[in-house]
Amino acid sequence: MSAKIIDGVAIAKAVREEWKHRADKLKVRGILPGLAVVIVGDNPASSMYVRNKIKACHEVGLHSEVHDMPEDVTEEMVLRQVEELNSNPKIHGILVQLPLPKHIDANKIIEAISVEKDVDGLHLYNLGALVTGNQVFPPCTPYGVMCLLEHMNIPVEGQHAIVVGRSNIVGKPMALMLLQKNATVSICTSKTRDLKQHTLQADILIVAAGKPKLITANMIKDGAVVIDVGINRLDDGSLAGDVDFQGVKEKAGYITPVPGGVGPMTIAMLVANTISAAERISR
Ligand code: NAD
C-alpha cells in the first residue's frame, strides 16, 4: 500500500482563504489585523521563516511589520520593544522568532508579551489554557497538525497517538491538543527506551525530534497516519524531515512530506491566530 500524501501547501492555502473572509469582515468595520515579528540576529533559517510569515500576512491583506534587532542587543532592549508593541493599537499579534541568542532569556521575553497578543501561543497563560481545555491561541505548529487531520477527515477520538518530542513549542502542546480530542496519547523523548516498541503501536504518529530519518518503515504499523514536523538541513543543503519518507510512505496510510507538509500550516495558523486576536479585541 502506498500512503496518501497530505498536501500541506494546498490545505494551508484553503485555511488562509477561510481566514481572509474573517479579516475582510473586520476591515469593513475599520479594523486591520496587524502582526509584529521581532527577530534578533541573522540566523538564515529564522530569516527565511520570518519572510514566509510576512508573505502570508500580505496574501491575506494583514498589516505586518518586522523589528530586526542585532545579535548583541540586550535583553532589556528586547523587552522594551515587546512592551512598545503591547501598547501599539495597530498590532494585534506579536511573535518573537526563536531561537534567541543565549544571553537573552527566551521565557522572560515570551512572558512579557501581552496574553491578548500572544499569537504564537507560547505564553504561560496560553499554554495553561491548553491544559484546562480552554485554548485561546493554540501554538501554531500543533494547531496546524490538528487542522491537517481535520481537513483529511482523519479521526482522532479513541486513536492511539504517539508524539515523539516534548518541546514546549511542539511536543507538549501537541499531546495536549490530541488529548483534548480524546486520543490516547503517549509521549516519547530522547530518553525513551526502545522507541520502536512505542511507535509500532501508533495509529497516529507525530514526530518532532529534529533528527533526520529517525523513523523508518519498520517502526510503524501498516496504515498509520504519520505526521512529520521535523525540518532538518542536510549536508547537501536539502531539507528533510524526521521520517524516512521514501520507506515509510510504502507502509503508512497517510504521510506528510517535508517540505510541503506541516511547515505551511504553521504559517497559516499564525495568520489565523492574528485575525482571531483582532476579532477578540473588537468584540
Ligand atoms: P527541540 O530540540 O526543542 O525538541 C526535540 C525533542 O525531541 C526533545 O523533546 C527530545 O527529547 C526529542 N528527541 C530528540 N531525539 C530523540 C530521539 N532519538 N528519540 C526520541 N525523541 C527524541 O525541537 P522542537 O523545537 O520541538 O523541533 C523539533 C523539530 O521540528 C525540529 O526539526 C524543528 O526544526 C521542527 N519544527 C518544525 C516546525 C514546522 O513548522 N514544521 C515548527 C517547529 C519546529
Image: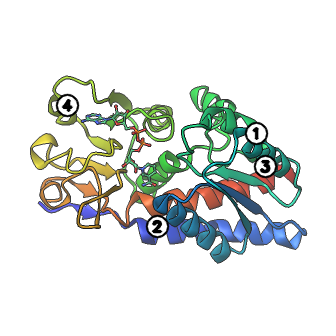
Disc 4 residue crowd, few under 14, some 14–19, many 20+, Cα 10 Å = some
Residue position for label 1? 76
Residue 81 - label: 3
Q: Contact, CB < 8 Å: mark 3 with mark 2?
A: no
Task: Determine if residue 160 is in view.
Answer: no
Mark 1 or 4, closer to the camera? 1
Residue at x 9%, y 44% (from the top left corner):
218
Location of residue 262 with respect to 167 vertically, above or below: below
Location of residue 103 with respect to 142 vertically, above or below: above
In terms of image quarters, where does ligand 1 lie? Answer: top left
Residue 195 - label: 4
Mark 3 or 4, closer to the camera? 3
Label 1 – label 3 distance at C-alpha? 9 Å
- Which image quadrant is residue 112 in? top right
Closer to the chain start, of discs 2 and 1, is 2
Residue 11 - label: 2
> Seen from this angle, which residue lies furthest left?
218
